[in-house]
Image (cartoon, helix red, strand yellow):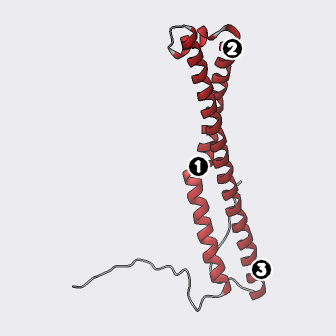
Amino acid sequence: FQLDIDLSAIRFTDHPLFTQEHTLAVQLRELAAQYEARQRLGMEDFLSEKLAALKDAYAQLKAAERLASEEGVGMASLTMGGAGGEREEEEVMAELRRRIRIYREEIRTTRQARDGEHTSELKTVGGIIKLWNQLKDVREVQGYACPGLRLLVHA
């Protein structure tokens, strides 16, 4: 058996003859690729929108609970599909409280996920800036630049 492979390009990520500048440039490219992948996914925006929707639904449930406790459960049972009766009213209130508890937990989980994603993005950006500053220092000490690498920051 013979295996033929056509390569159009090879990119080394590590090599014994790499200078410190080459090593920093490779690390910088990898971090930039991670950041771009995170931006393409848009998880922080998605989680923020999900959190807003959950808060709206939670507020509606709280309003329904407040209305049910002030005016009796009859109003809430209409919205939940019940017909009436004291036992059913208690079940409706218990269901409302259960749903409120579930939404509260989902809000907390989503907020933690969004904050974690935001922290990860900030750490990635901080790492990019740190590596870029190290790369600039190495270039200044050398007096020249080997890999043609530029950092463009868009606000």
Q: Nearer the viewer, mark 3 or mark 2?
A: 2
Please tell me which of labels 3 and 1 falls first in the chain: 1
Residue 54's place in the image compared with 15, above or below, is above
Q: Nearer the viewer, residue 86 or 15?
A: 86
Dot 3, how many residues are within 10 Å of its Cα: few (below 14), some (14-19), or many (20+)?
Answer: few
**Residue placed farthest to the front in the image?**
87
Please tell me which of labels 3 and 2 falls first in the chain: 2
Expressed as whole percent of the image width and height from the top left, the position of residue 119 reads 70, 56
Q: Which residue is mark 3?
A: 137
**Image quadrant where one finds the N terminus:** bottom left
Expressed as whole percent of the image width and height from the top left, the position of residue 108 reads 66, 41
* Residue at 59% across, 13% down: 76
Q: Which residue is mark 1?
A: 43
Q: Amino acid at mark 2?
A: Ser
Q: Amino acid at mark 1?
A: Met
Find the distance from the CA under tag 1 to the CA under tag 2: 38 Å
Dot 2, how many residues are within 10 Å of its Cα: few (below 14), some (14-19), or many (20+)?
Answer: some
Find the distance from the CA under tag 3 to the CA under tag 2: 67 Å
Q: Nearer the viewer, residue 146 or 15?
A: 15
Residue 35: image tag: none
Q: Which residue is mark 2?
A: 69
Find the distance from the CA under tag 3 to the CA under tag 1: 34 Å
Q: Amino acid at mark 3?
A: Asp
Q: Nearer the viewer, mark 3 or mark 1?
A: 1
Total marks in image: 3
Residue 124's place in the image compared with 26, above or below, is above
Secondary structure at badge 1 equals helix
Secondary structure at badge 3 equals helix
